[in-house]
Image (cartoon, rainbow, N blue to C red):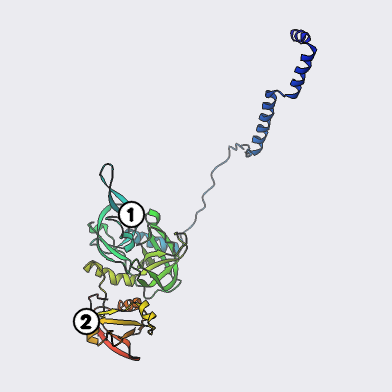
Amino acid sequence: MRRFVMTQMMPRSEWDSWTARTRRRPHWLTLFGLWFAVFVVVWLLIQPRRPAPLNNPNAVARDVTPRGDLSADEQATIEIFQRASPSVVHITTSALARSSFTLDVFAVPRGAGSGVVYDTDGHIVTNYHVVEVGQRRVVRLADQSEWEAKLVGKSAAKDLAVLKIEAPANLLKPLAIGTSSNLVVGQKVLAIGNPFGLDQSLTTGVVSALGREIDSVSGRTIQDVIQTDAAINPGNSGGPLLDSAGRMIGINAQIASPSGANAGIGFAIPVDTVNRIVPQLIRYGEERRPVLGTVTVEDSLARRAGLPEGVLVRSVNPGSAAEEAGLRGTTRTQLGDIIVKIDDYTVTTKNELLNALERYNAGDVVRVSVLRDGELLELRAKLQSVDRE
């Protein structure tokens, strides 16, 4: 009654003005209520529907179905892995750096890869690009023990390197060595390594192709490379490629992939190359290629001069196998010999000449076919062990 009386006491004009404003402006509580209701409805609609629990007291785990014996192929793969994995190591490299604030020296990780125990003297075979960068190298064996390693030999041209650790012989399990000369496309292969730092990983596949060529760190080509679809990822480099007998037939080196991860095209350096180069790296610290003792002209210069395919001899080293064989160098008045064959291996570039010579040992006698004044001559040369190419 009080409110009614008070409003009745207002002048008529003020009363009409107040009621008009009230009708035009809705109350803020009403607006808030409407928005809250809309929010609740939308929230309920978007919530996932959860089924009501069944609360079945009779629910039990199902019985396990016996799988039976493993297949012969599975058993063979397991046996190969168990026999070969102790021979595969994990290699990490680091460089020393000094803090600009405290002047403390600390190690900076540079890379990681895999390797193979070559003998009980502690020699570890891996890729050169795995250990190329870094001053400190650590080898972790299959028993997880870690050993400081020193670089005893390297071949950038073949992307191979040998490390040595001072581990006891009972911890070193040399991997069985096979041959890559009789491989066939389609035969089963296995790769063991440490992809992305994951120790002792196994992948399987087949030999996809043979006789491939890949570029090494030095720019030289590596011939007779094995192509496989066994998964090879960063960290697998330096690990072994095995045949179905568990023998090493190659060292995993590269992949072809637009993303940098496995795309089913991996390459391994053939074990015949590994078995020929590694003893030289252990003995001399470097690859000792047999040579003729010639200095040759760059391919690009010879092509621009319009010369026939082959390798032009610029000069012959005094007392070399080339001089004894009668090879002729280039002078201002005469064109030197153009080497076109070493035995039955056709030579069209300097790289092919080097690859052809690497098939032999120092002391071997080879036929050197040359073009001289438009005529094809065949000379005989006894290869040297000193690399002067």
Res 315 label: none
In terms of secondary structure, where does tag 2 sit? loop
Residue 151: name its quadrant: bottom left
The residue lying toward the viewer, choosing from 215 and 336, is 336
Question: Quick check: 16 above or below 75?
Answer: above
Residue 162: name its quadrant: bottom left
Question: Quick check: 40 above or below 276?
Answer: above
Dot placed on the residue nearer the N-terminal end, 1 or 2: 1
Question: Quick check: 145 above or below 253?
Answer: above
Q: Amino acid at mark 1?
A: Arg
Q: Residues within 10 Å of mark 2 (few under 14, many from 20)?
A: some
Please name the residue shown 50% across and 54% down the image. 66
Task: Give residue 280's position: percent from left, percent from top.
Answer: 25, 70
Question: Quick check: 70 above or below 276?
Answer: above
Residue found at the far right of this picture = 12
The residue lying toward the viewer, choosing from 63 and 295, is 295
Viewer can see residue 197: yes
Please name the residue shown 25% across and 88% down the image. 326
Task: Give residue 76's position: percent from left, percent from top.
Answer: 41, 64
User: Which residue in the protein does label 2 denote?
Assistant: 320
Viewer can see residue 342: no
Task: Give residue 370's position: percent from left, percent from top.
Answer: 32, 87
In the visual, does 295 lie left or right of 194? left
Please name the residue shown 51% across and 50% down the image. 64
Residue found at the far left of this picture = 319
Q: Amino acid at mark 2?
A: Ser
Residue 57: name its quadrant: top right
User: Which residue in the protein does label 1 denote?
Assistant: 110
